[in-house]
Image (tube, rainbow, N blue to C red):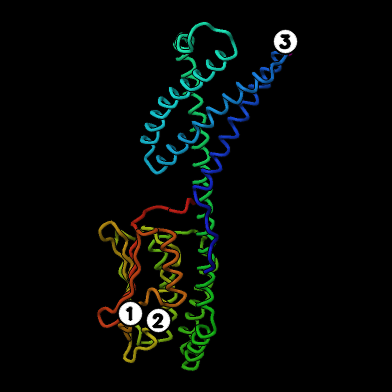
Amino acid sequence: MTSTKQIDSPKVSQDFAFRFILAFWLLLGLIDLLKNVVGALNAGRTVAWADALQFVALYSGVWIALSYPIYRLFQRTCGKPWLAKVAAQAGGSLLFGCAHTLLLSCAYSLLVYLSGSFETSFIEFYLPRISARFFPVWLNSALAYWVVVIILFAFDYYEQFRRQSTLALQLESELSQAQLQALRMQVQPHFLFNAHNTIAMLIRRKKYDQAVNMISGLSDLLRTTLTREHHQFVTVDEEVAIINKYLAIEKVRFEDTLTVSVEVASDVSDAQVPNLILQPLVENAIKHGVARALDGACIRIFAKKCDGMLVLGIHNTGPGLAESRDSVRTGGIGLQNVRSRLQKLFGNEQRLSLANADGGVLAQLEIPFLIGRQDGE
């Protein structure tokens, strides 16, 4: 299975959002400057560029200074539940609204005070003005705070959507590769050679009905593999059905030396499993267990629910594993592909084990118990 491209870190998108916010406040400051200039020109007044630039720098500067704490608060609440996020941002809007109002009003008043000739002290000049304008300025500041937060939320949700879409495409690509891998393993020379030899043997023994059935079974298996719906998940019954087609051919090849039993609990028939996840494990059992057994072999496939998990197992009699070998980690491409797909689909909520058991080897999967399509189709 080819490696997939690493998805960008969420912090990259959040940092871009923060830079976007800084540019946003600078743009608003320039718009405010343009509005003041146009208003002065329409009124026939001379544009006081120095004063206009001072007030614009003050307006944008205060917001740029306060944007970083807002951004940090947003980062700290990213992983929290929705209600906790809203509560934190509501408290932030109250706090930063007050801080912005006091800073902005104080700075504006200081500029006006320094530009005029006032006999009163700055505090006597400032207090009446901040008292009269506190609430409307605070309300405007609180609303502007929510503009910043909404921008951050928009970037965050876009990033989540992009990451989920990228992951879905990766899983779809890996599913297609898993199907191709299964097909390659089925049509590789030794498989076709063995199947054709078995068909020739049946014809020489004049067992024509069995030969025709095997040809039909081989065609059905290849056709099913090629035309199977491109779902990431299928039901347990659907997954077992294609395994049965494969084992039907192998049973003819091994004649009376291979016994197959399938035990699917009634409450897991409609549970969801990754498409073609069992195929490499069954082929592994045939290659390393059944084909090396001297006195016949048995393959038992089972599916059950245990402690809220779906447990899938494939047990084969025959030679066991070497005691010093970690077969799941050092196994062939088939086992590595199974492990990789499970990790991407379920993270740490899955387990794949391969161990000696009951005179043979047991390969067992444990994944979350899911009902209904999980791939959005």
What amino acid type should be assigned to the residue bearing mark 3?
A: Arg
Give the x, y percent position of residue 230. Answer: 52, 60
Residue in the foreground of this view, choosing between 278 and 42: 42
Helix, strand, or loop for circle 2? helix
Q: Residue at x 60, y 13 (%)?
A: 115
The disc, 1 or 2, on the residue closer to the chain's N-terminal end is: 2
Local packing at callout 1 (Cα closer than 10 Å; few below 14, some 14-19, many 20+) is: many
Q: Is residue 162 magenta?
A: no
Residue in the foreground of this view, choosing between 194 and 331: 331
The disc, 2 or 3, on the residue closer to the chain's N-terminal end is: 3
Q: CA distance from mark 2 to mark 3?
A: 93 Å
User: Considering only vertical position in the picture, is 128 above or below 245?
Assistant: above
| Magenta residues, dominant SS class | loop
From the image, tell me which residue sits under label 1: 316
Residue 265, by quadrant, is bottom left
From the image, tell me which residue sits under label 3: 45
From the image, tell me which residue sits under label 2: 286
Give the x, y percent position of residue 28. Answer: 61, 26
